[in-house]
């Protein structure tokens, strides 16, 4: 039994290739147990929770499932012991699992995950969650964490308070966006509150160009969705006093923990700070918009015929003084 457990552990730890696996299977079928044992001994496999108890130890009872156990199971440094099956269920259901013993504060580490032989993707998810939590704890006071919008990226920077807007260029190559209103691409020549207005006016000038107009309509719709999301967060969210992450309350009391439900479960990225929801700072919507009075393209062209810009220089011919329409990209 111990030999089979060691083989299972080696497979879980990716210590055996597919070719070696087939060879060992052949040796087992031929009854060459000593040869297999020598190979496994040279793999330096880690101890596993399913290893049978030594003869000098008595069977014990798992305090979660109350089954009699004849393997070593898992134990925290304070020797609170639970069976491997219960612990794996616990690890699967909680992002940052702790010892199940009431009052024990021990948090499982990556070595505990490997000892329990949890899947590799769960270990990777644990590493990513730990990294995200570490980044969240770096922000202090009024500082803000700005993350790349691409879900597969996750890069982040810490923005100092009251610095104003600037261009965020992520190393992953995603489209640069504004750190204040989150709109992309970044708008050098327009304040955040004017971007939507200018986009709508520019859309009126490009009604004949279907592809360009559709792209602008997509941007307008995306802004409307972003604005609705920001307004919802302003009405329903408070800011974590530690990392400034928006937190919403579904039901229950006002006691909150950043990144999860107060009593466990519903794991999300967060720094783990406990706070009172009703006393926390309200989330402020960062998307602004000016009301646009609709004008037809023909009317705009007629109105612009007599306009003159004496101090403007053409970017193509470099002549000063532009009569009629003057175009300036906001990006």
Image: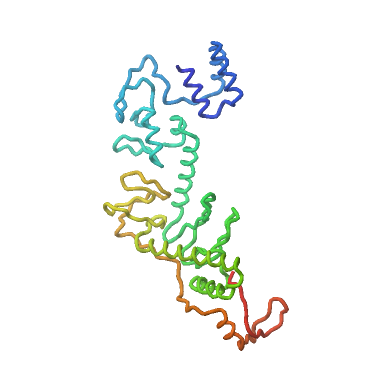
Relative to 114, residue 199 above or below: below
Residue at 54 percent of width and 75 percent of height = 201
Identify the colour scheme used.
rainbow
Q: For this rendering, which residue is in front, 298 or 97? A: 298
Q: Position of residue 142 (x, y in %)?
A: 42, 61
Q: For this rendering, which residue is in front, 306 or 320? A: 306
Quarter of the image holding residue 225? Answer: bottom left
Relative to 238, residue 126 above or below: above
Residue at 60 percent of width and 65 percent of height = 211
Judge left or right: residue 269 versus residue 67: right
Residue at 44 percent of width and 37 percent of height = 109
Q: Position of residue 275 (x, y in %)?
A: 32, 54
Relative to 328, residue 177 above or below: above
Q: Position of residue 23 (x, y in %)?
A: 59, 19
Q: For this rendering, which residue is in front, 173 or 73? A: 173
Q: Position of residue 279 (x, y in %)?
A: 30, 60
Which quarter shows the N terminus? top left
């Amino acid at each position: 039994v111990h030999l089979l457990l060691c083989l299972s552990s080696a497979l879980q730890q990716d210590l055996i290739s597919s070719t070696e696996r087939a060879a060992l299977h052949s040796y087992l079928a031929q009854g060459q147990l000593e040869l297999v044992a020598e190979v496994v001994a040279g793999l330096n496999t880690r101890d596993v929770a399913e290893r049978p108890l030594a003869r000098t130890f008595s069977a014990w009872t798992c305090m979660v499932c109350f089954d009699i156990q004849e393997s070593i199971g898992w134990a925290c440094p304070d020797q609170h012991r639970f069976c491997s099956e219960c612990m794996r269920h616990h690890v699967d259901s909680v992002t940052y699992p702790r010892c199940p013993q009431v009052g024990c504060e021990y948090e499982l580490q990556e070595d505990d995950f490997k000892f329990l032989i949890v899947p590799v993707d769960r270990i990777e998810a644990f590493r990513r969650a730990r990294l995200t939590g570490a980044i969240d704890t770096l922000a202090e006071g009024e500082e803000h964490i700005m993350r790349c919008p691409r879900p597969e990226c996750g890069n982040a920077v810490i923005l100092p308070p009251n610095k104003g807007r600037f261009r965020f260029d992520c190393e992953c190559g995603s489209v640069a966006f504004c750190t204040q209103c989150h709109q992309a691409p970044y708008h050098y020549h327009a304040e955040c509150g004017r971007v939507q207005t200018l986009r709508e006016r520019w859309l009126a000038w490009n009604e004949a160009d279907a592809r360009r107009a559709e792209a602008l309509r997509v941007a307008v719709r995306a802004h409307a969705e972003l604005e609705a999301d920001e307004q919802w967060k302003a009405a329903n969210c408070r800011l974590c006093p530690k990392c400034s992450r928006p937190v919403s309350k579904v039901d229950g009391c006002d006691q909150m923990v950043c990144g999860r439900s107060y009593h466990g479960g519903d794991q999300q990225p967060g720094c783990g700070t406990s706070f009172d929801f009703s006393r926390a700072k309200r989330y402020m919507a960062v998307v602004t918009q000016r009301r646009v009075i609709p004008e037809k393209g023909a009317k705009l062209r007629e109105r612009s015929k007599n306009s003159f810009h004496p101090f403007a220089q053409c970017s193509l011919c470099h002549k000063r003084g532009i009569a009629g329409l003057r175009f300036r990209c906001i990006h």
